[in-house]
Image: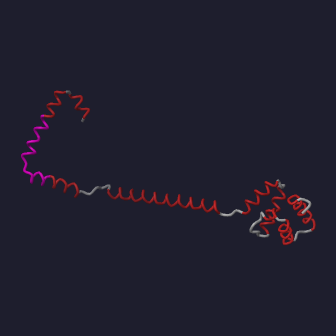
Amino acid sequence: MILQIGQMGLSSLSSLANGMLAQIPALQSQSPTEWRDKYLQSMKSHFNTVDPRLLFNFIISVTCIAAIFIAAKLLSAIQKKRQVEKTRSRPYKLLVKTQAALGLPWRDRWLLWWLSRTLNLPHPTALLISPAFFDRAIERYNPSRRRRAHWAAIRKRIFGSDS
């Protein structure tokens, strides 16, 4: 409407203002009760009509709220799982990293990992720290003579020849 007013020019603007002012007496000629009754009837007719999209809008709103709730729960569960994984002890991961730091060959690393899994050791890295623990684990495993020689070579690489 503002664009139309700008295009009309000043003379048209004054005629438009005169037309609006002409309607004011028509409104003033009605009594306040008539005007109020017409207004209330208009509101009544407006609120008595049912919006055909009301159910659709309600379903869409509930669906959006449910989707937001589910997404929040999913993100919360993912965050909780990540937090648990960070705090959980990983003894075999420590064993593998320690073996790599010691520079052990792949076959020795695999054999030590397999030994700790077979004996179900709660702290497998202790095999690399304590010669006595290593010896007890080998005794529990009870390998053949040929394997004993290989385990002795692994023990020598880890602890040196003087232990």
Q: Which of the pair 153/117 is nearer the observer?
A: 153
Residue under the point 50% across and 61% down: 73
Position of residue 161 in the picture relative to residue 126 (left or right): right
Which residue appears farthest toward the front when viewing the image? 162
Position of residue 125 in the picture relative to residue 51 (left or right): right
Write down the quadrant of residue 156 in the picture.
bottom right
Q: Is residue 24 magenta?
A: yes
Q: Which of the pair 17/128 is nearer the observer?
A: 128
Classified by dominant secondary structure, the portion drawn in magenta counts as helix
Q: Is residue 30 magenta?
A: yes
Position of residue 57 in the picture relative to residue 72 (left or right): left
Q: Which residues are magenta?
A: 18-38
Percent across and percent down for residue 84 are 61, 62
Looking at the rendering, in which quadrant would you find the C terminus?
Answer: bottom right
Percent across and percent down for residue 155 are 87, 62
The image shows residue 91, relative to residue 53, as above or below, that is below
Write down the quadrant of residue 60 in the picture.
bottom left
Residue under the point 90% across and 65% down: 147
Percent across and percent down for residue 134 are 84, 66
